[in-house]
C-alpha cells in the first residue's frame, strides 16, 4: 500500500477589518512611510479591535471557513493544533477555546509555541498523526493578535506587526501528494534578542513589570535580521537540495512575512524569480504565526495539484525551518 501522506485539502483565513497604515503610525511615533516601506516593505497592517476579542476569535472565523467550503461537520475533526504567541490565556490552551467555540466535541487539541516558526512546527507535528494512519481530519491553526503585546510608543517594533489568522485542514493522501519533508531548527541562545520579558513564571506580572513595559515585544532588530536572513535562506536552500529540487521544480516559495528584505534574500538564495514568491507583507505586516497560512489562503485559488511548494520561516527563540509539500488539489 502506498505511504500515507498528510495533505492540505482546504485553507481558511481571517484578517480584521481595521487597518493601521504607515500614515496612522506617523501620528503615534517618530517614523514615516518612506522609512517603513524601504526597510520592511510594509504599508499597512490589520488590528483586531473590540473588547474581549482574542486570537481564538480570529481562528474561529478561519476554521469556520474550512467547514463551510468543505461541508464538514465540526464533529468530524479529531485534533486541532494551534500555533500562537498570543494565546487567549496562559492556560488553558487556545486550541481548547477554539474547539469549544466551534462545537468540535470529538477533537482534542493543544498549542504550539515557536514564535514565527510555530505554523511549520505545528504543521509538521500534525502531519505525523495522519501519516501513522491514526487520524483522518486534523486542523492546524496559525495566528496572532500581535497588537495585544505591542508598545505603540516603540517605533522599532510597533511598525512591524499585525493581527491575523489562517488555518488548514490535513487529510490522508495515497497519491504521493502532501507534506514530503521538513527541516526544523531551534537555538535557545537567540532568546535574548526577541522575547517578552515578563508575564511568565520567571517574572510574573506585577505593577512594576507593567510600569516598566515588560509585557511588550522586545526585539534587537538588527541582530534578529542578521540571523533571519542567513538561516531562513539556508534552510530553504537546504530543503531544495535534500529533495533534489532545482529552481525550475519549485512552483512557489511561501516565506514568513517579517521583512521584504529577508524574503528577497531567501528568494535569491533559492534562485527563484519574484513571481514564484507569495508576498502580502505590504498589506498585513508580520502576523507571526499567521503569515504562512494567510499566504496559502490568499493564493489558494492559484495553486494546482502537484505544485511543489516550499514554506520557510524564522522567528523568536530562535526557531526556523522549511517544509516541502506537493499541493493536493
Ligand atoms: O518575525 C520574527 C523575526 N523578526 C524579524 O525577522 C525582524 C528582523 N529585523 C528587521 O526586520 C529590522 O531590523 C527592522 C525592520 C526591525 C529594523 O530595520 P533596520 O534596518 O535593522 O534598522 P535599525 O534598527 O538598524 O535602525 C536604523 C535607524 C536607527 O537610527 P540611527 O541609530 O541610525 O540614527 C533607528 O533608530 O533607523 C531608526 N529607526 C527608525 N526610524 C524611523 C528604527 N525604527 C524606525 C522607525 N522609523 N520606525
Image (spheres, rainbow, N blue to C red):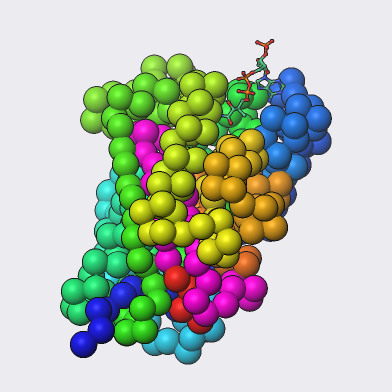
Picture quadrant of ligand 1: top right
Q: Is residue 49 left or right of residue 149?
A: right
Say which quarter of the image contains residue 314: top left
Q: Quadrant of the N terminus?
A: bottom left
In the picture shown, does residue 31 fall above or below 160? above
- Horizontal placement of 231 versus 108: left or right? right
Depth order, front residue of 299/168:
299
Q: Residue at x 47, y 89 (%)?
A: 71
Q: Residue 317, image x and y in percent?
A: 35, 34
Please say whether residue 77 is one of the residues in the magenta stretch.
no
Q: Is residue 137 visible?
A: no
Q: How many marks?
A: 0
12 in relation to 215, above or below:
below
Against 44, residue 78 (above or below) is below
Residue 324 sits inside the magenta stretch = yes
Residue 205 placement (x, y as % from top left): 34, 27
Q: Which x, y percent locates residue 31?
A: 75, 24
Q: Which residues are magenta?
A: 300-325
Q: Which residue shows up at 80% across the image and 32% down it?
A: 33
302 left or right of 148?
right
Please give the name of the residue rendered at 40% of the width and 77% of the height, measured from the top-left corner. Answer: 177
Q: Is residue 185 visible?
A: yes
Residue at 35 percent of width and 66 percent of height: 180
Closer-to-camera residue (186/142): 186
Residue 14 image offset from top left, x and y in percent: 58, 63
Q: In which quarter of the view is residue 40 placed?
A: top right
Amino acid at each position: 500500500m502506498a505511504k500515507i501522506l498528510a495533505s492540505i485539502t482546504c485553507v481558511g483565513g481571517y484578517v480584521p477589518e481595521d487597518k493601521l497604515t504607515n500614515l496612522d503610525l506617523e501620528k503615534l511615533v517618530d517614523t514615516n512611510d518612506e522609512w517603513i516601506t524601504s526597510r520592511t516593505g510594509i504599508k499597512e497592517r490589520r488590528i483586531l479591535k473590540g473588547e474581549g476579542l482574542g486570537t481564538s476569535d480570529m481562528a474561529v472565523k478561519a476554521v469556520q471557513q474550512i467547514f463551510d467550503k468543505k461541508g464538514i461537520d465540526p464533529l468530524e475533526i479529531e485534533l486541532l493544533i494551534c500555533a500562537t504567541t498570543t494565546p487567549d490565556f496562559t492556560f488553558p490552551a487556545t486550541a481548547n477555546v477554539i474547539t469549544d467555540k466551534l462545537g468540535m466535541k470529538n477533537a482534542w487539541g493543544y498549542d504550539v509555541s515557536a514564535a514565527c516558526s510555530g505554523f511549520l512546527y505545528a504543521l509538521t507535528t500534525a502531519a505525523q498523526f495522519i501519516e501513522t494512519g491514526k487520524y483522518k481530519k486534523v486542523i492546524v491553526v496559525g495566528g496572532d493578535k500581535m497588537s495585544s503585546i505591542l508598545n505603540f510608543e516603540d517605533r522599532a517594533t510597533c511598525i512591524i506587526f499585525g493581527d491575523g489568522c489562517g488555518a488548514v485542514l490535513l487529510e490522508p493522501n495515497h497519491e504521493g501528494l502532501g507534506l514530503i519533508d521538513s527541516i526544523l531548527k531551534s537555538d535557545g541562545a537567540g532568546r535574548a534578542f526577541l522575547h517578552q520579558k515578563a508575564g511568565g513564571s520567571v517574572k510574573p506580572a506585577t505593577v512594576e513589570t507593567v510600569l516598566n513595559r515588560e509585557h511588550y515585544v522586545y526585539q534587537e532588530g538588527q541582530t534578529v535580521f542578521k540571523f533571519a536572513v542567513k538561516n531562513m535562506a539556508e534552510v530553504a536552500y537546504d530543503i531544495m537540495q535534500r529533495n533534489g529540487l532545482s529552481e525550475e521544480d519549485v512552483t512557489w516559495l511561501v516565506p514568513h512575512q517579517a521583512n521584504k528584505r529577508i524574503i528577497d534574500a531567501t528568494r535569491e538564495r533559492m534562485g527563484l524569480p519574484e513571481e514564484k514568491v507569495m508576498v502580502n507583507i505590504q498589506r498585513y505586516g508580520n502576523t507571526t504565526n499567521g503569515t504562512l497560512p494567510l499566504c496559502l489562503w490568499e493564493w489558494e485559488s492559484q495553486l494546482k495539484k502537484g505544485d511543489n511548494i516550499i514554506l520557510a520561516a524564522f522567528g523568536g527563540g530562535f526557531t526556523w525551518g522549511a517544509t516541502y509539500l506537493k499541493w493536493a488539489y
